[in-house]
Image: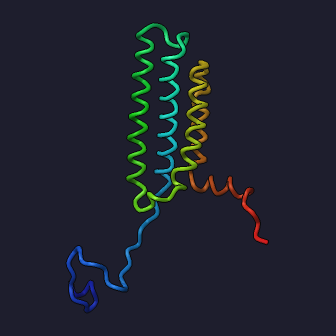
Amino acid sequence: MMAANRGQPPRRARAPLLQDEVIRRRRPTFVPDLLFGLATILWTMAAVFIAVSFLASDVVSGEAGANLARAFSVMLAISGLLLAIIGILLLRDERTRADHFTVPVVVGFVAGALASALFLAERADLVWAPFTLLAFTLRPVRSLAARPFRRSPQ
């Protein structure tokens, strides 16, 4: 223990750090941002399908169809909640930074609304297309997309 501390007395495992000791924290990866985008897609789709199950009788056929649509909505909402919880846990110490939430939630809302509209329009061949918008939740893609909108220093 003395060799690891280089001549300093050993300290307990929970003792405060010394002046020259620094804990280097790693930044979170792109995974939490992607999970927040997916969670928002699921929540948006759940909200649309719940609304459709109550308001549109031509989309769901009979009581069984309405109940299936509502059950599907609840499953989407629960899946979105679990993805959001996993994303929050993966953020580590950056849970208070808003940039992990704002862009993924906006992109997820747009993609979820588009996917729901395509699903309800019975365009199964295009339902996957809005999910490609999740690429904009990744930090490198966001910084490249924002580059034209930045002000140049004068």
Q: Which residue lies at the image location 22% right of the left edge and 74% below the top edge?
A: 13
Q: Which residue lies at the image location 57% right of the left edge and 20% below the top edge?
A: 120
Q: Position of residue 64 (x, y in %)?
A: 41, 10
Residue ranking furthest to the front: 55
Q: Which residue lies at the image location 47% right of the left edge and 23% below the top edge?
A: 50
Q: Is residue 41 above or below residue 99?
A: above
Q: Is residue 21 above or below residue 77?
A: below
20 lies left or right of 9: right
Split into 4 quadrants, where in the image is the C terminus? Answer: bottom right
Q: Is residue 119 above or below residue 28?
A: above
Q: Which residue lies at the image location 40% right of the left edge and 59% below the top edge?
A: 92
Q: Position of residue 39 (x, y in %)?
A: 47, 40
Q: Position of residue 94 (x, y in %)?
A: 45, 60
Residue ranking furthest to the bottom: 7
Q: How many discs appear? A: 0
Of residue 2 and residue 60, the one placed in the foreground of this image is 60
Residue ranking furthest to the top: 62
135 lies left or right of 16: right
Colour scheme of this structure image?
Answer: rainbow
Split into 4 quadrants, where in the image is the N terminus? Answer: bottom left
Q: Position of residue 9 (x, y in %)?
A: 21, 89
Q: Is residue 12 above or below residue 77?
A: below
Residue 68, picture quadrant? top left
